Image: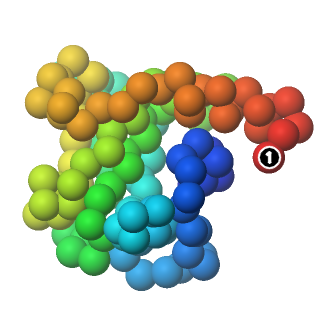
Amino acid sequence: VAKNILENTFKNVKRMPYGNPGYDFICGRGFKVDVKSSRLHRRKEHLPRWEFKINYNKTAEYFILLGFGEGYINTEPKKIWFVPATEVNMYKNLCIREDSHKWDAYERPIQPVLDQCDDMRNGGV
């Protein structure tokens, strides 16, 4: 779902075939972009957070991290970050707390993603 949303949200992207190692898209400028998504996790004794499996990926040049709301049904995207790989490729799992501001510099407006979700729900795309 995240790849479909993002493929239609960003312009001039080429989607790679399923199972392509290391990245999901090549953007208009030729950068390799890997897409990761996570629902918001709430656990006892932990603040709510998104968990992204980066798996020490050194192939991608950028990561798009898409954070969904809680649960598995009817969740809406809540946050999107566009992060240079050099900031995250040293992690197996990257956790971003809901109240964290560490990644604010990489956050992008969520409205275009929400618009794309609406289009998909209404039979577009």
Q: Position of residue 43 (x, y in %)?
A: 30, 28
Q: Inspect the image, locate mark 1, and give the three-letter code of the amino acid beneath it.
A: Val
Residue occupied by mark 1: 125
Residue at 56% of width from left, 58% of height from top? 12
Q: Position of residue 16 (x, y in %)?
A: 56, 75
The type of colouring in the image is rainbow
Front one among 55 and 122: 122
Could you say which quadrant of the image residue 89 lies in? bottom left
- Secondary structure of residue under mark 1: loop
Residue at 20% of width from left, 69% of height from top? 56
Front one among 88 and 40: 88
Please give the count of numbered marks on the rendered protein.
Answer: 1
Mark 1 nearby-residue class (10 Å; few <14, some 14–19, many ≥20): few
Residue 12 visible from this viewpoint:
yes
Front one among 66 and 73: 66
Residue farthest to the top? 99
